Image (tube, rainbow, N blue to C red):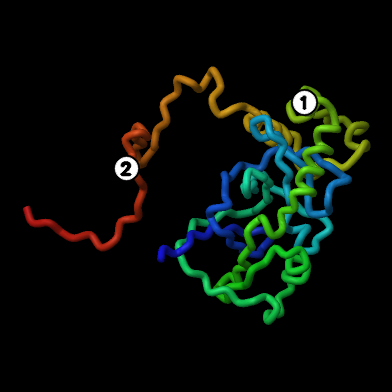
Amino acid sequence: MDKPTYFSFTSHGQRFSINATYIDEVLALPEIMMLSEAAPDILGAINLRGALIPILDINISLGATTSDYHLSDSIIVLNQDQLKAGIITNTVHSLETASLEEIPTKSVNHPALANLRRKNMIAGLVQDAHNTLILKGPEHWLQYVEVQQVISMASLAGNPSQIDNAFQSPSTDEASLSQGPRFFPKATPDDRTILQQRANNLRQPLQSPETQNVKNLSVVALGGQLFGIDLDLVQEFIEISNLTPVPC
């Protein structure tokens, strides 16, 4: 039987793994629309190609009251039966094809487990160099009602054009900042510009008029030189091991 593939990431010093079948895509951290009345773990929402996606901060699930963010952070978009949500993470690691030996968390005294176990998020713990926590499938902890609540709240914040304008050109004066919570309060003006550019890019459809005639390339590096290969000609990417020399 094929071994499952796990996707691992680190959030605030704690390493997690989740079955890769739940991963839709990984995004560079954009500006997030804050929703103060959402469930405690849900920070806000982003506009992902016309769909409002709730964003969870797993550090809050771990018990922290606030989180520090960085431009190098990412959002992992999870998809469970067309129900999508994102998780903010500090570091994304490689895929791991392995049969992870899970230890039931009830028998493990681990400081990060109390809240996560209560939220039904954790399947077990791997006692490796990282003490990796194995997340259950999103269907166990990604509540449909909560997600729909966030989407409804974001929609009620204004009509779609108003929401888009909020993502495109937020006001940065002191009066607007005092009106409510603001994502990434320690961001510099330059950081804020980058966050907004990322958010604006995520709003665009994958096939816009400007990209319909664009060719997809696989870019590889050889001897310090970059080469592009038509992606339609690429069958797969593999790691080379145990090469066998062939005479002549």
| Disc nearest the viewer among 1 and 2 | 1
- Of all residues, the one furthest to the top in this rendering is 209
75 relative to 173, above or below: below
| CA–CA distance in space, label 1 to label 2 | 46 Å
Relative depth, front residue between 102 and 222: 102
Q: Is residue 156 above or below residue 22?
A: above
Taking the image as shown, residue 2 lies to the left or right of residue 130, namely: left
Quadrant of residue 151 within the rendered picture: top right
Q: Residue at x 90, y 32 (%)?
A: 176
Residue located beneath label 2 in the image: 222
* Secondary structure under the numbered disc 1 in the rendered image: helix
Question: Is residue 127 rendered to the left or right of residue 212?
Answer: right
* First-in-chain label (1 vs 2): 1
* Nearer to the camera, 203 or 81: 81
Looking at the rendered structure, which numbered label has been put on residue 41? none
Amino acid bearing label 1:
Pro
Residue 135, picture quadrant: bottom right
Check residue 160 in the rendering and tell me which mark sits there, or answer none: 1
